[in-house]
Amino acid sequence: MGAKSNSAGGTINEGRSIKTRMDLEQMGHEVVGIVDNGKDAIEIAKREKPDIILMDIVLKGSLNGIEASGIICEGNGCKIIYMTAHADDITVESAKKTKHAGFLFKPFEPYQLEKVIEGSFAQ
């Protein structure tokens, strides 16, 4: 799900995408895209240039969210918030090696999403 100025965006797995989109819009963010694979996430991010990208770590296709984020953030100061139900040490450590603005561990509540986004803008 990608978002513009005071918006959030990036990729969200289908199970939560509608709810998360509604939560973001209620917070005043513009959602510029929802995708379920790394290739589409890269295309939308490069085209729309969202202020924040919400990136699920587990995606369909050959690229996971960590790999897609690495490509998206090459040479720029993008902000990635990772969302995952996979909080194992290997996954978290792998994500920590990339540019990121925070983590959301599923399931999460709208107030948690809002706080992580606020924190990323403060960085």
Image (cartoon, rainbow, N blue to C red):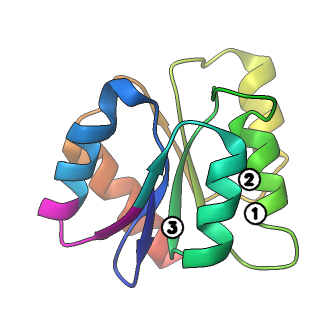
Label 1: few (<14), some (14–19) or many (≥20) C-alpha neighbours in 10 Å = many
Residue 116 appears in the figure: yes
Q: Amino acid at mark 2?
A: Ser
Region of the chain picked out in magenta, as a range: 25-32
Percent of width and height locating residue 64: 74, 33
Q: Which mark is residue 100?
A: none
Percent of width and height locating residue 22: 17, 50
Q: Amino acid at mark 1?
A: Ile
Label 3 to label 1: alpha-carbon separation? 12 Å
Q: Quadrant of the C terminus?
A: bottom right
Tell whether 78 sits left or right of 70: left
Label 1 to label 2: alpha-carbon separation? 5 Å
* Residue topped by disc 2: 69
* Residue topped by disc 3: 52
Residue found at x 83% / y 34%: 94
* Residue topped by disc 1: 72
Label 2: few (<14), some (14–19) or many (≥20) C-alpha neighbours in 10 Å = many
Q: Amino acid at mark 3?
A: Ile
Mark 2 lies on a secondary structure that is helix
Residue found at x 59% / y 64%: 44
Rendering quarter of residue 106: top left
Label 3 to label 2: alpha-carbon separation? 11 Å
Label 3: few (<14), some (14–19) or many (≥20) C-alpha neighbours in 10 Å = many
Q: Earlier in the sequence, mark 3 or mark 2?
A: 3
Mark 1 lies on a secondary structure that is helix
Is 12 situated above or below 86?
Answer: below
**Tags 3 and 1 touching, CB below 8 Å:** no
Percent of width and height locating residue 60: 64, 26
